[in-house]
Amino acid sequence: MRQSSLVVVANRLPIDDSVAPDGACEWRRSPGGLVSALHPLLRQTPATWVGWAGGTGPAPALADVDGVRMHTVPLTAEDVRDHYEGFANATLWPLYHDAVEQPVYHRRWWEAYQRVNQRFAEAAAEAAEPGAVVWVQDYHLQLVPGLLRELRPDLRIGFFLHVPFPPPELFMQLPRRAELLRGMLGADLVGFQRAQAAHNFAQLVAHVLDVPADDRRISLDGREVRIGAFPVSIDTAEMAALATRPDVVARAARLRRDLGNPAHVILSVDRMDYTKGIEQRLKAYSELIADGHVKVRDTVLVQVAVPSRERVGQYQVLRDRVEREVGRINGEFGRVGEPAIHYLTQPFDRAELAALYRMADIMAVTPLRDGMNLVAKEYVAARVDDTGALLLSEFAGSAAELPEAFLVNPHDLDGLKLILMEALQADRTDLTGRMRAMRAHLSRHDIHSWARSYLAALDSSGSLLNRVVSPG
């Protein structure tokens, strides 16, 4: 078996769900998220991606994609139910997002989480060449670093959490909190989106495990584990180039015409998730219409809500609620050929997303809690003429990097309405100044900058860094 100097370990393989008869498959590029972040990096070095292919039963053999080897980890239907839908997404996900929904605890879910994490650790150990760098991703696999260190102490192991890490009083609810912390501490470097998350982690480790810990390093079992904030970003240049392609520019103009050439287009692009603040956004918008501050003919909201985790009960209930609210608003305020909200649930490819970003005067990104939110950064990167307004939740990680956005508290409906009206009424000079500043920040802090900073901290020799990330 071919081994790799860089191994990425994530819950899902970064491929589409349909495989051609010859075994070929393509990168799956969702709005924002892990795949968009790592895709540009892995084509530059011998790399393996360890992950689940999305089905149940034996692991399929998949061809390389862009030179990256796909190493599939098999999951049974029980694994998917108890590990992915259960402990990962009904226990950890709501807890890590400020318990927006009540976390659920079942002992069999924890047993499945342990079992699946062991399987991923064994797959990573098999794929990594001696002394390789293994980069474990996200909350599904928090036990993998510790398990992998037991199997392969020769490896450099990194762990990166793409979601928020909760304050101690929330994390302490977890029945198996010590095991999760020790699992993450199997890494040489634990990375978070924001400094506050690293601080929360250090506090918990000191309290729960009773070991020396500060916001930069933790001492455990004779080892030093480094921790820190590494805000993930996007391929800014790629999005800007895509947004200037003639077919994308023409598509954006055509989309605007299809909407009736309104004075203002507001766009939101989310996964269907209770953390995204979709219901609060729809409520605020409908109240602006009812109050007469927004006219349906002049202003259009386009809400893209891509289905997510559809077998998890909380998500099924959320989708039903959102669709009822969209129907109510359109029934009350829309006209024939002029809906108040254009509601779309299908995924879009990169070019279509770029066209949507170019079309929209205002991008409303208002999650109740988010680790980073790369959609906000993608919108800024696509506004190559320095126009447009970004309405951004204070509780998205990207708010710390984009203070020039129109920052809002999505829990405060009156405040959300007020800031939305401010964005709608802002003059061009103000908007240009804000967008130019945000674009300048993203040009300096893009995906390559993120990878350089994280891998430089993880791989002190610099040998992998020189191969993975081109300078400049």
Image: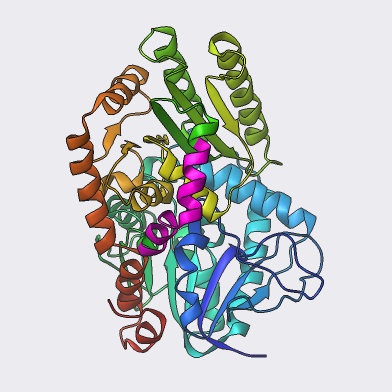
Residue 318 placement: quadrant: top right
166, above or below 215, in the image = above
Q: Quadrant of the N terminus?
A: bottom right
Residue 91, percent from left and from top: 57, 44
Q: Residue at x 35, y 79 (%)?
A: 222
Secondary structure mainly formed by the magenta segment: helix
Kindly indicate the quadrant of the structure image that contains residue 215. Answer: bottom left
Q: How many marks?
A: 0
Which is more toward the observer, 445 or 132? 445
**Above or below: residue 161 compared with residue 388:** below
Left or right placement of residue 396 versus residue 4 in this view: left
| Residue sitting nearer the eye, 303 or 467 | 303
Q: Is residue 241 magenta?
A: yes
Image colouring? rainbow
Residue at the image point whose x is 40% and y is 34% from the top: 366
Classify 132 as above or below 399: below
In screen coordinates, is 107 left or right of 257? right
Q: Can you give x and y, in whole percent of width and height, for residue 42 in the image?
A: 49, 76
Q: Quadrant location of residue 127?
A: bottom right
Residue at position x 62%, y 66% in the image: 13
Position above or below: 207 against 426: below
- Camera-side residue of 227 and 442: 442
Report the span colored magenta. Answer: 237-255
Q: Is residue 46 magenta?
A: no
Q: Is residue 173 visible?
A: no
429 or 82: which is nearer to us?
429
Is residue 264 among what the camera can see? yes
Name the image quarter holding the C terminus. bottom left
Residue 60 x %, y %: 77, 72
Where is residue 271 drawn, in percent x and y? 55, 42
| Residue lying at 76% horizontally and 76% vertically, measured from the top left | 61
